[in-house]
Image (spheres, grey):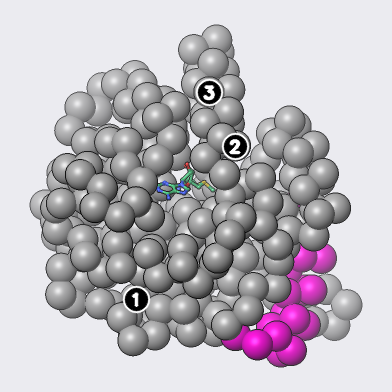
Amino acid sequence: MDGLLKITQDKKRLLQEESRKTSKWSYRSSNLTCGSVEKKFIDKNIKMENKDFQASELGTKEFWENTYKQEFTNFEDNGETGDVWFGKKCQQNIIEWIKTCKEIKHTDAIVDLGTGNGFFLITLAEQGFSCLTGLDYSENAVNFAKAVAKNKNINHITFEVADLLEKDCNAISLQKKYQVCHDKGTFDAISLMPGQFEHFKNAYVAAVGQILVDSGIFIITSCNWTEKQLLEHFKGDFHLKEVIPSPSFQFGGLSGSKYTTLVLIK
Ligand SMILES: C[S@@+](CC[C@H](N)C(=O)[O-])C[C@H]1O[C@@H](n2cnc3c(N)ncnc32)[C@H](O)[C@@H]1O
C-alpha cells in the first residue's frame, strides 16, 4: 500500500459515491489502479483543453470545511493528524527534491497553496526551513493546521485563510512574494469546481504568477491531470524544469502512474 492515497473509511464511502458520478479524481481515489490506466487511454484521445471528468462535491468549500472539521475533532479526540494526500512517499519525494535543489535556500519564502492539515509545511519546518506560509480557503483547515503545528512546538509557520481564486483578496499571504509555490491536490480540487473550468484555471494561474518571484519554482502534484495536460494548462506562464518521479505500476499490459509531480519555473 506504500505510496497509495490514504483515505478514511468515511471519505472512501463518499469517494465511492462520487465515483459513480464519474469524477476521475474520486474514481482514482477509491480505485487508483484502474483510474490511472483509464487515464492513460483517455489522454491519447481527449482534446487537451477539455476536462475528462465532471465537477463534484470535492470542488466545493463546504466539502473541505466538513472534512477538516471532522479531522480537527479526530485530532482533539485521539491525536490523529489526518490524511497525507497522495501518501507519505509522495510528500517525502517532494521534500527530498526541495532539500537537494541548489536554487532553494532554507531561508527562502515557501508557500503551500491549499495547505489542508499543514503537514507538508510542518515537515519542512522540522527539516530546518524557516520562512513558511500555508493558505487555505477553509477556515477549519487553517485552525486544524495551526493546532497540529502548535502541538509539535512549531511556531514559525504562518497559516492564513485565503481563497486563491478570489479577485482582489486582501489576505496578507497573497500580497507577498515567494521563491517556491507548492500545490498538492489543490489545483485538482479547483478542477472539480462546478462552473467554468477555464475561468477557474485562469484565476489560479494568475494567482500563482502574481505571488511567485520571476524564475521562481512552482511544484504541483495532481492525480486528475497527466504531465502533458498540466504542461498545456500552464504553458505561456511556466515551463518545465523537472518531473519528480512517482511510483508506477503495470496493469493489463499498460504502465501508469498514480499521480504526477512537476517542477515548473515562472
Ligand atoms: C486535496 S486537499 C489537499 C490538502 C493539502 N495540500 C495536502 O496535500 O494534504 C485540497 C485543499 O485545497 C483547498 N482549496 C481548494 N480550493 C481552494 C482555493 N480556491 N483557495 C485555497 N484553498 C483551496 C481545500 O480546502 C483543501 O485543503
Q: Residue at x 55, y 65 (%)?
A: 196
Q: Residue at x 62, y 47 (%)?
A: 58
Element type at marker 1?
Answer: strand
- The residue to which callout 3 is attached is 69
The percent coordinates of residue 102 (x first, y second) are 19, 71
- Name the main secondary structure of what is drawn in magenta: helix
**Front-most of 251 and 74?**
74
The amino acid type, in three-letter code, at marker 1 is Leu
Residue 38 included in the magenta stretch of the image: yes
Marks 2/1: CA–CA distance: 29 Å
Of the numbered discs 2 and 1, the one sitting upstream in the chain is 2
Observer-side mark, 2 or 1, equals 2
Q: Which residues are magenta?
A: 30-48
The crowding category of the residue bearing disc 1, from other C-alpha atoms within 10 Å (few below 14, some 14 to 19, many at least 20), is: many
The amino acid type, in three-letter code, at marker 2 is Phe
Element type at marker 2?
Answer: helix
Asked whether residue 259 is in view, the answer is: no
Q: Residue at x 76, y 39 (%)?
A: 14
